[in-house]
Image (cartoon, rainbow, N blue to C red):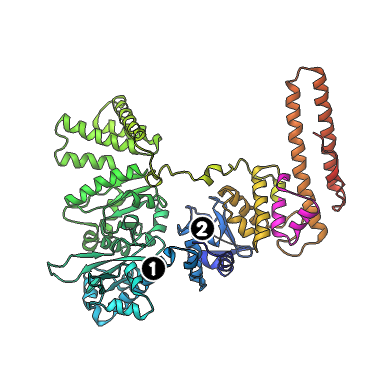
Amino acid sequence: MRIPQHIIEQVRQQSDIVDVIGEHVKLRKNNRNYVGLCPFHKEKTPSFNVNDEKGIFKCFGCGKAGNVITFVEQHMHMGFVDAVRHLAQRAGIEIPDEQRDDPTGEFARQDNAMRALREAAEFYQHILESSDGAPARAFYAKRGFTEQTCKDFRLGAAPAAWDATMQHLLARGFAIEHLVDAGLVITREDGKTYDRFRGRAMFAIADSSGRVVGFSARTLTDDPGQPKYVNSPQSIVFEKSKLLYGLDRAKRAIQAERTAVLVEGQADVITLHQAGITNVVASSGTALTPEHLRILKRFSDAIILVFDSDEAGQKAITRGIELGLAAGFDVRCVVLPAGTDPDSLVRDKGADALRPLIADAKTWLTYQIDRLRLTGQLDDATQQAKAVRTMLEWIASVPDALRHPFLLRDVAEAFRLHEQVLSQELQRIVGGTAQRTSSRPAASRSEVPAAVPAATPAAEHRPTYVAALLPSERELIRVALTVPDALAIVLNEYHVTAASFWSEGGRAVFRSILVGSEEHADATQYVLHDPALTAEQRREVADIMFAASAPSTSWKQFDVEVPDYEVHRTIRDAILGIEIHRVHQRIDGATQTLEITADADERKRIMFRISHMIQHRERLRGAFTSDPRDLSWLHADQTS
């Protein structure tokens, strides 16, 4: 989907950055900026700044920076289009139907399905509060869910009638095709349709942004002929292998704790969240998958597996260890008391019964050894060798090779084996894996492991950010972006181009400014989101903009009317600074060449060039005291 540029600009302008960020960060006014604790890293002293005049934010601790769209992208882990749509919905701005620009109509189908699901969730919540919702309310109450928890997790109740949900949504303007795409209705062989969910307790399933994409519906009767759960089918908006239940509510806590707690069921998630343990998620109606862990890796590098204490739960932990290590996680495991699961343990004994178990979670190695020993799978040398080999295979799958020796040492100590023996076996396993991989046909993009993402052409050819900008380059960029008409002076009177900058970063940023000033209403906002720049370069621009909030030595205030004389002097001084640095570097280069040159005539020629460059540098230095409108130094001899 491509959102028109004028819509993006409208969304940005009508999304007050202080209000948007203030929903997630406690901000206080500090001179021209608002400050607060950074939401992207742990800190005790506020270093996160928001400038509402320019619509930008910058953390001077971790370096995160950008505008309101960037914040939503980074904090809510959305793509650019989703971030714009989120802000548009918040601001009440309608994004035009993209169906005409999408020959397949895929976006329109997805959008209609998502709207139908959102409307259905609200309908089920309404039914829960009505007389028809009494059985579901009793079920939730028995599970210990409070009224507020039901609202927070959008729990509801489906009417028992065969077509109540369908008729409600059709009356709201949806077509039957929208409901089929959303997985809300089923079409019979004779073409008639009926509700998929009837007479059940409804658990809304949301994506990481909080948008409802499906449902899990639990039976409220003891009828053995009815399945306990009916879930939304795979659809154009619902892929259960890519959804973690509760992630929309848990992601901030996961980031703060730097650890995600993985449980098996939705009731586990809800109960633990209600009890104040909020960094908890579960897979949605399926076993844990590598895709689940790829998504979770965006928020944390550590997971704690808290599965049921029965045999199935313990097998699931073993599978979770294998997948977690292969995804690059630090994996720990909780052993629950026999006959319990996280939900029942907290309901019966309170959150304090589970918190110590999570805090003292076993390492994956300790858990696995304990389990194998308890089940009699370490009774002889053959079994022990099999267990060690399995663990070495897991270690071989860890993407970070630097972790291998440390994990190897732990296994050696646990089994009282020599590290060298295990290291040789590990190398054999790693070598065998590499050989098998190389003998396979080339992997498709979807088969590339998450730890080694496929490089895109843009990423392969993007210039590397080599060094920070010169102070003079920063000053010139600051003036060009913040002083009215300064960019025109820079271009038309001083004839500055990207090549005028010394650093690659300076050249890249200035090229972005030129594009932004020609094609967009606000060049600063364009630069802060320009995909042609590296993240470091965009952060440098944000840093420059915040530095511009303080009084400059060359002009008195930020983004207000500045005397024309001061503007010219500031521009002149910045360009002189860049040129003097350039000449100084050439002098250094020539001096180094002179030191290794033996030929007398060549040495004389080099010395003459050095003398000439020194004279030119002194003329440039002298220009600092001249009238800012005297541009004769621009045309001075610059022979090098």
- Say if 39 sits above or below 583 in the image: below
Q: Is residue 531 left or right of residue 480?
A: left
Q: Nearer the viewer, residue 209 or 317?
A: 209
Amino acid type of the residue tagged 2 in the rendering: Leu
- Does residue 494 show up magenta in the picture? yes
In the image, residue 104 lies at what x, y percent? 43, 63
Q: Quadrant of the C terminus?
A: top right
Find residue 151 and report its image quarter: bottom left
The mark that comes first in sequence, 2 or 1, is 2
* Region in magenta: 475-500
Does the stretch in magenta take in 121?
A: no
- Residue at (38, 52) in percent of width and height: 295
Picture layout, residue 631 above or below residue 555:
above
Residue depicted at 22% across the width and 78% down the height: 161
State the predominant SS element of the stretch in magenta.
Answer: helix
Image mark for residue 114: 1
Q: Secondary structure at mark 2?
A: loop
Foreground tag (2 vs 1): 1
For residue 37, the mark is: 2
Q: In terms of image quadrants, where is residue 499?
A: top right
Say whether residue 367 is visible.
Answer: yes
Label 2, label 1: how many angstroms apart (C-alpha)? 34 Å
